[in-house]
Amino acid sequence: MDAEAVARLRRAIGRLARMFNAASASEDLTPTQASVLGLVAHRGPLGLAELTELEGLNPTMVSRVVSKLDGDGLIRRLPDPADQRAVQLEATEPGRQTHQRILAARTETVAKILEGLPPEVGDTLRDALPALEALAEGMRDRRG
């Protein structure tokens, strides 16, 4: 892929990310807070170290985000049965509901956009999903 194509891809991904981030703002969460909540709601219970690795954030940032989400009643800290010095995080019912609203808003946004595009564009995007998933995985691996 040439430099111009890479730049176009980066710009498109950036625009999509900003659009998706608007859904978290409607819930009074930052994109990072929404991402952490999503991981805990989807994969929980999670330990702080695992969450730090999955999010690719520094431990201090994860601690701040977790404190905010915990303070808002969206997640809760539980003792880790394997290590009483550590905690596990799980989403509360309000946290799961918030996560579901964010997902629904993001899905609705994409669906509305796809409705306005020619069907072959949707087909091309579906066919490109494995490549986009590989790109995301490669970026995560490189970050780690």
Image: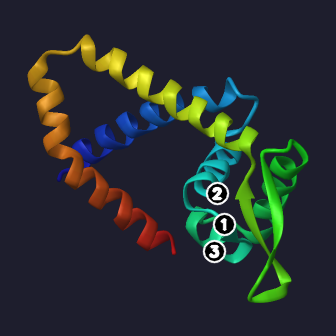
The label number, if any, that marks residue 40 in the structure image: 2
- In this view of the protein, which residue sits in the foreground, 42 or 34? 42
Residue 118, quarter of the rendered image: top left
- In this view of the protein, which residue sits in the foreground, 89 or 60? 89
Task: Kindly identify the residue that appears in the image at 30 percent across and 41 percent down.
Answer: 9
Task: Name the secondary structure under disc 3.
Answer: helix
Q: Image check: 78 left or right of 108?
A: right
Residue furthest toward the left?
A: 120
Residue 66, quarter of the rendered image: bottom right
Residue furthest toward the top?
A: 116
Amino acid beneath label 1: Pro
Q: Image check: 119 left or right of 81?
A: left
- Can the viewer see residue 44? yes
Task: Name the secondary structure under disc 2.
Answer: helix
Task: Kindly identify the residue that appears in the image at 37 percent across and 43 percent down.
Answer: 10
The label number, if any, that marks residue 50 in the structure image: 3
The earlier-in-sequence mark between 3 and 2 is: 2
Task: Kindly identify the residue that appears in the image at 45 percent across and 37 percent down.
Answer: 14
Q: Position of residue 11 (x, y in %)?
A: 39, 36
Residue to which mark 1 is pinned: 45
Residue furthest toward the bottom?
A: 83
Q: CA distance from mark 1 to mark 3?
A: 10 Å
Task: Kindly identify the residue that appears in the image at 35 percent across and 15 percent down.
Answer: 112
Whether pointer 1 and pointer 2 mark residues with C-beta atoms closer than 8 Å, the reply is yes
Residue 120, quarter of the rendered image: top left
The label number, if any, that marks residue 82 in the structure image: none
